[in-house]
Image (tube, helix red, strand yellow):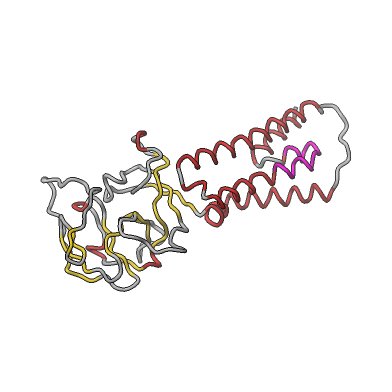
Amino acid sequence: MKRIFAAFVLSILQPGLGQALNRQVGKGIIFLLLSPVLVLAAGLTNLLHTALGLVAFAVLGGLISLWALVDAVYVARRRLGQPLEKFNRWALTLALVLASTNILAGATGFYITRVLHVHAYVIASNGMNPTLRVGDRIMVDTAAFTKELPRRGDVVVFVRSGFGETMFPKRVIGMPGDQLEGGDTVKINGEPLQESYLAPLDPSMTATVSVGPTTVPPNHYFVMGDFRQNSLDSREYGPIDLSQIKGKVLYMYWSPDHSRIGKRVE
C-alpha cells in the first residue's frame, strides 16, 4: 500500500513522477513534457485571452493530471509484491530534472508571466464601477502593449510611484498630445467624448471633479475611472507614463455576480 500511496502523492505533486516511481521512466517523461507543451501551445495561440480558452486550458490540464494519477496508481497496485525491474538511470535523472523544472516554473509563475503573458488581479475598489466591481477577478494581457500603444477606451492596469507593485485599473481617456477638459462630460480637443460605460451620477455624492484644460504630455496617458464621482485618477495625480502601464484588462474570470463571469471588459 505504501507504493500506491507514494504513486498517488508524487502524481499530485507533478504528473509523471508516479510513473518514474513505477520505473516506467519513458512514460513518466512523456507526462512530464505534456504540461509545458500545453502551456507553450496556449501561449502561442493566446488561448487564455478568452474566458472559454481559460476553461479549455483548465480542463485539458486537469485531464492530463488525472490521466497520469490514475495510470500511476493502477500500475502501482498491479505491481504490489512484484520485483522491481531494472531501469535506465539516465532516463530517471532526466525525469527528475524535468519534474524539478516544471515544479519550479509553476511555483515562480514563470509559465504565466513569460509564456502565457497573462496575470490575474482582484478588484478592491469601486472606482471603475459599473464596468469593474469590488470582488471581480480579472485577467490581464501583460504583453498587450509590447507591439502596439494603448488606445482611447482601453481599460488598463498600471503602477504608481510610491505604491510598489500595486496595480490600479482605469480607463484610458486622453492620448499623448490631447487637450482635455470637463467634468460630467469630458471634451477631447474641444469635442465631447461619448462614454456609455459611465456610472450614473449619484445626487447624494459630491459633484464630479473637473479637469483642465490640460494637454497630455508625449508618451503619457490620461486615465479616469468609470465612477467619476468616486475615482482617484489622473485628475488628481496627473497623466501616467507609458512605462507605468502593465497590461490591458481582458475579461472577468470570476465575479460575486455569477452572471458577469466570462464577460469581456470593454
Image coords of residue 131 (percent x, y): 30, 46
Specify the quadrant of the image occupied by residue 130.
top left
Residue stretch in magenta: 18-31
Report whether 93 appears left or right of 162.
right
Q: Is 204 within the magenta? A: no
Q: Residue furthest bottom?
A: 218
Report whether 57 appears left or right of 223.
right
Image coords of residue 34 (percent x, y): 67, 44
How many numbered circles does the render carry? 0
Considering depth in this image, is 67 or 250 the residue closer to the camera?
A: 250
Q: Is 19 within the magenta? A: yes
Image quarter hosting the N terminus: top right
Image coords of residue 258 (percent x, y): 36, 34
Considering depth in this image, is 220 or 119 the residue closer to the camera?
A: 220
Q: In the image, what residue occupies the spot 71% across and 50% down?
A: 98
Q: Is residue 157 above or below residue 88?
A: below
Considering depth in this image, is 137 or 150 the residue closer to the camera?
A: 150
Q: Main secondary structure of the magenta part?
A: helix
Q: Is residue 161 above or below residue 126?
A: below
Q: In the image, what residue occupies the spot 29% across and 67% down?
A: 239
Report whether 145 appears left or right of 259.
right
Image coords of residue 250 (percent x, y): 41, 49
Q: In the image, what residue occupies the spot 26% across and 54% down?
A: 225
Q: Residue furthest front?
A: 191
